[in-house]
Amino acid sequence: MIFTLALRNLFHDGIRFVGTLIGIGFAIILVTIQLGLYLGFSRQITAMVDHADADLWIVRKGTKSFEQASVLDGGERQLALSVEGVASVTPLVVSFLEWRKPNGEATTVVLVGTPLTGGLSPWNVVDGSPADLAIPDGVIVDRTYLDELGIHGRGDTAQIENRTVRVAALTHGIRAFTTTPYVFITPDRARSLIGYGNSDATHLLVRIAPGANVQAVQAGLQARLPDVEVVAQDVFSARSRNYWLFSTGAGFALIAGAILGIIVGTVIVAQTLYASTKDHIDEFATLRAIGATSRYIHKVILCQALISAAIGFSLAALAGVGVVYGTQDSVLPVVVTTPLLAALLLLTVLMCVVSAMAAIAKVTRIDPAMVFAR
Amino acid sequence: MTEAVLEGKGVTMTLGEGAAQVHALRGVDIALHPGELTLLMGPSGSGKTTLLSILGCVLTPSDGTVMVAGRATRRLGGEALAAMRRAHIGFIFQSYHLFPTLSAQENVELVLDVRGEKNGSVRKRARAALAAVGIEHKSAALPARLSGGEQQRVAIARALVGNPSIILADEPTAALDSENGHAVMEVLADVAKERAVMVVTHDPRTLSFADRIVRIEDGLIIGEERPRA
């Protein structure tokens, strides 16, 4: 009966209820977009680190992100290989360089020098294969950056540091948060283009031997290589994410937008529930007069809040699916994962329950004697 | 005479403070017995509704004692008073106070739901209560689809369904025409065969149904008569 009464109360105020649902829907869509962008940006930022075939990363001290590493002193790879529990150490060469388009214009790219196997081999290759990096002058770029790189597809050529490169394969969806395109190349050619020595690297990717303890190997490496930093994969991933999202302010802006959405949604629902409770105050007083407990009456109001949350969330989720599909290939992909969806549902319920507090405070003060005066 | 199921002794109600202070009730003694329909009559502002509210445990008196089914209500908190109302008292209001979004049947079932009764007999009992007041055929109708008399019958069914020992009615015929008012009083007189029923009223049409008439003025009981004695 509580559910029936709550549902009927809501539908009795049809226009107001539609307003509530629109309010909840927009608030949740706003929060979804903000958090979805945050998640999308996070994935873009950490994609390189997360896809690397590594348990530990060796970088120069103070390295804030994947892209901003500088060249190691040399010799670290051999020392690392001598540490117990280390199975392999793969060098990566990463640097910002200038890409000159066929029409003569220039743009900055992030050159990623990686071995053909292991290391940071390009993934999601949709035209060609990762092995095509072996083609003389071959590079692999992302399809979504073709316009920005001034090329049309496989086989096209451009120049990096006045040396010709040829697009050997295309990936899909490997985009950078900085909007600077990644260009995959072999480590040797990367060193040659940048002007590094034969064994120079900016990152060393460490795989540990089966059965070895990651923390123990990390400590051993750090002891053997005191002048560099040995970082766990997940720590380096989080460091890159935090650097780009929070040093640029983008993360704060997205989180602030999400908080704003929550506040707006809460105020809208609270206002509606309060007004609905006020309109039905005679009925709540009657309930009290016929002996309903405060708990019973609170349940009716909470039920109204939860029904609003369920319908509002469903509408927002439908719209959210549209936003996710509409943006998946865009510069700003909105990513909604199952945990985020569950968190949004929880947030919607929480928002509506908090919103019910004002209405509950109102009915708590009801004097059942008012039923005799009306 | 059977033992009183509801009793007020020295019931006093003072409202406001200082110069604005009003003595709504000045030490009223009253007892209601099962099998008796009591009319509480008096002019506007005489304290009828205040006394009904106090006897119905929705208002706490400034002084005096109220006993419901042998238990004193003094010092009981809001939830305990609600439990007292739930267990012993059925209310009928002048303006019905039916829930506009619930059908007649649901309005009656609501009382059982409030009492925590969730078993399969709820529907049957609500139906029986509606049948007892002759409105079973309108059980699916919303209050807006019912006439004033029909709405008041649903309200009576709602008051009866929990099988309370006391029925308190506030001007139940005031909003009804002569025919419907008469029908409602017939139902209440029937109800009073097994319960204590008190009806607050101005309506002279109700006099013929009374077992007892209590007159109140300026917060004092000024007279009592038993027309059938």
Image (cartoon, coloured by chain):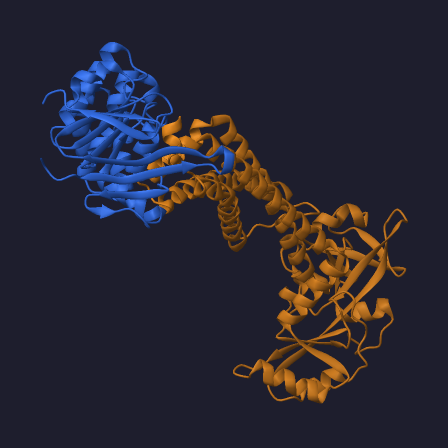
Chain colours: A orange, B blue
User: Is B145 in front, or is B68?
Assistant: B68
Residue A119, placed above or below residue A16 = below
Total count of labels:
0
User: Quadrant where the C terminus of chain B lies?
Assistant: top left
Is B194 on the left-hand or right-hand side of A84?
Answer: left
User: Is A272 in front, or is B215?
Assistant: B215
Rendered location of residue A356, percent (x, y): 49, 43
- Residue B142 figure quarter: top left
Residue A194, placed above or below residue A353 = below
Does any portion of residue B139 appear in the rendered image?
no
- Residue A281 figure quarter: top left
Residue B134, placed above or below residue A151 = above
Rendered location of residue A66, percent (x, y): 73, 66
- Residue B162 figure quarter: top left
x 31%, y 33%: residue = B51
x 23%, y 10%: residue = B179
Does any portion of residue B80 appear in the rendered image?
yes
Rendered location of residue B174, percent (x, y): 31, 17
User: Is B200 in front, or is A313?
Assistant: B200
Is B181 on the left-hand or right-hand side of A72?
Answer: left
What is the residue that sits farthest to the top in this orientation?
B178
User: Quadrant where the N terminus of chain B lies?
Assistant: top left
User: Is A189 in front, or is B50?
Assistant: B50
Rendered location of residue A168, percent (x, y): 73, 56
x 81%, y 72%: residue = A70
